[in-house]
Structure formats: C-alpha cells, structure tokens
Image: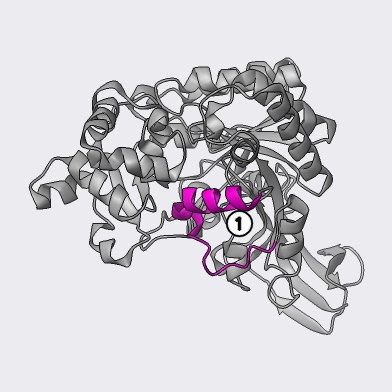
Amino acid sequence: MDLVIRDARVIDGTGNASYRADVAIDNGRIAEISREGEGPRPSGQRTVDADGLALSPGFIDMHAHSDLALLRDPAHTAKAAQGVTLEVIGQDGLSYAPVDDRTLAQVRQAITGWNGDGSDIDFNWRTVGGYLDALDSAHDGQGIAVNAAYLIPQGTVRMYAVGWDDRPATAQELDRMRQLVAEGMEQGAVGMSSGLTYTPGMYAKDSELAELCRVVAAHDGYYCPHHRSYGAGALDAYREMVDLTRDADCALHLAHATMNFGVNKGKAPDLLALIDAALAEGADISLDTYPYTPGCTTLVAMLPSWASEGGPDAILSRLEDDETAEKIRHHMEVIGADGCHGVPIEWDTIEISGVSDPGLASCVGKTIAQSAKQRGEEPWITARRLLINDKLGSTILQHVGHEDNVRAIMQHRVHTGGSDGILQGFKPHPRAYGTFPHYLGRYARDLGVLGLEETVAHLTSRP
C-alpha cells in the first residue's frame, strides 16, 4: 500500500463504537481496514504511528462562505487544518453564479463583507458550470484544497432575472428564474440557497420560492434557506419553510438553525418539536449549527429591507440623506427592522469584526455602542458613518445567542455541523477557523454534550 495508518482508534462516522485498527491507503483511497487481532496487518511504503490518536472521515462543512477563498489560497488552511474535506458554498442566497456582467458587479459589492471585493479574482465565468470549472482548474490546474459542493443562490438568480425591486416576479421573469435554476442543477449544483433577510432574495413570496424548489426537487437537490426571521418570528419562519418545501416535495436543510435574541431564550425545544412533527409526517429535513453563541453577518444586513431596495448604490444614497437616514434609525431602534429579525437593535451587541477600508480598523473589536461612547455621539451616528465610509463592507459579530439553545439543538438526530465561516476581517468570528475542533474539544471531550462517536457522525455521515 502507499500508506498505512497503524493502531488508530477508528471512529468511522456511523455513530457506532470506535475500534482499534490499521487503515491502508492506496491510490488516494481507503483500500483496507484491518481490525486489531483480525488477520495479517497491511504493509505500506509509508506508515504513520497513530497509537493513542483517533482517526475519522473528513468533516463536511454544511454552511461555508469560502466561495472566493478557495480560489485565493491553495492550502486553504482555514478549513483543511480543521479536518474539513468538503464545504457547501453558495450560501444564503448570494454568490457569484449564475450572473451576467451587471449582476456580477452588484453581487460583488453586496457581499464584499463576506468574501472581499474580488479585485484579486479573475471572474472568467458567468454560469454555475463555469464557476465549478474555475474551482477544478484553480492554482495552475492543481484544483482547490478541499472538495466543494455548490448551492444555486436564489437572491442572485432574482437579481439576474428581476433586479432589486420589491415586487412579485412576472410570469416571464419566473420562467427565466426556473430556467437559471434548472441549468445550474444540470451543471453540477446540489441544491438552492436563500437569504430571506437579505435583499433582493427576501422580496420573493413563498409561491415564487416553491416554484423554484420544484425545479430543485426534479433534479434531486435540496433547499437551504436562511429563513425570514431568526428573532421575533423565528418559529413561524421555520414553520413557513417546512410547509413550503412539503408543498414543493423538496428536501429541506435549515441553515444555521439557531434560536437567538432574548425572545427565544430557552425555546430550542419548540423548534425541535416542530422538526420532529414534520419528520414523523414524512418530511425530509436536516439542519446545521455552529457551536458558538454570537452570530456573524454584515452591518448593512441590519437595515430594513425597504432601505435596501435598488441595491448598494441606492442604500448609500438613502444613508447620505438626513431625512431618510432618520427613518432608517427609527425603524431599527424603535420598530425592529426585518434585517434585524424584527427585534429593535441593541447596539451593545453589535461588534465590528472587519472593515474593507483599513483606515477604519480602529473600529474593529469594539461594539457600536463602545465606539459611539468614545466619540461622544449616539450609536446610530457611528453606525451610519461606518456604513457610508466603508461602502457597506463592514462585518459584525452579533452577540445574541443562548448556550442552552446551542447545546439542545446540536444533540438532535438530524443535526449537522456548519461553520458559517466568514474568512474576512481583522477579527473574524472564531467559527471560521474553529468550528470543528470546538465541537470535538469543548462539546464532546470537555462537556460531554455528545459522545465522540456521535459527534463525528454529526460531522461526517449525517451530512
């Protein structure tokens, strides 16, 4: 054999008890697993002494934002060093295929906070197949460091066919979106994602989403929504996605399925009861979480959806107009914007984790409230200035989670691991680099929330 890993504690991903064995690799594949005391031991050109160590399949990151990072870094150590061997990208309804020239420019600006502005990337594709080809041929033909699966981003599809208007799609536009989704599935995508608190994807009604999900289902894919609320309307939003996909007969994977904000403290059992009831009725559902309490997104995502209609340039124009900016502030601080999941924003929970303009780096690591206090001004003044000066490129950590909810959800039988890792910013969320060690170290080894065999199953065979 090319390689033999000797005397490992093999945790095979099934959830069954581990066992001691030699594992032989030949031509890049597992060729033999020889359990201790069962027959002759394989020999190899190279051997690794794994006595006292555990060996498992590679981990699957069910929710990754490495769409451009895979093209930048041949080693991609952010994930490879965690043991991740497959990432699911194209998440939250916004990514870089399918596009035309107009859409590509808009989506690059819209998700600068997730992936950078892409000025270092050769965007030589416009289709899903072209993007996947770019991954395969990256780094002088060596390809990317880990495997990738792609979800067609529904927000990008709507941007392409409808634009940034908050209105129903016409029959012709809906046909165009169906066509784009079908082509993407035929070219190698595994499903479709949505970001239903992000514009313009959030402007789609359920009937429109169901039509696209029917196309996904016809190609044996799954739907992965970031649903319409993780705050005040969280349970209703989960139920909406369950009902929508049951109607479309489409498999459902709930992205970063947390129960955050004060209104949802202790309500993880309500979510799990909803999922159990749907599973008992025959629904095909899974979910992913990251093992931390803070969330992470862009600062501009906190704005009400009406303030984002028309795209990034329109957003900046509204922020620069004093009267409109005051309406935005009132909506965010008093009413509760849909961008902040219907909950009035608490500026002391919003920590700046990254900026696009290095000149704004002094804001990183501080909450909006802290920066505002240092400047002697109201938090909205600070936030508004940052949005304008950073051209909407700032990322945030949002400290709104609950540890009891995190632990309860990760124990569910259809739970999988997803980092939701944004690899941008001077102080990125630790989930980008630490999700899988955190599951194995803190929650399995230290706290015993899950056994090690069960944890590995959640991170490998369950996905």
Vertical order, 257 against 246 (above or below): below
Q: Amino acid at mark 1?
A: Asp
Q: Position of residue 18 (x, y in %)?
A: 71, 53
Question: Left or right: 82 with respect to 356?
Answer: right
Which residues are drawn in magenta? 100-124
Answer left or right for 173 relative to 411.
Answer: right
Q: Nearer the viewer, residue 330 or 55?
A: 330
Instruction: Confirm whether the magenta stretch covers residue 115.
Output: yes
Q: Secondary structure at mark 1?
A: loop
Identify which residue is drawn at 54% across, 64% down.
78
Q: Quadrant of residue 350?
A: top left
* Res 400 seen here: yes
Whether residue 275 is visible, yes or no, is no
Using the image as rendered, state which of residue 160 and residue 401 is in the foreground. Answer: 160
At 71% from the left edge and 41% from the top edge, which residue is drawn?
462
Indicate the quadrant where residue 334 lies. Answer: top left
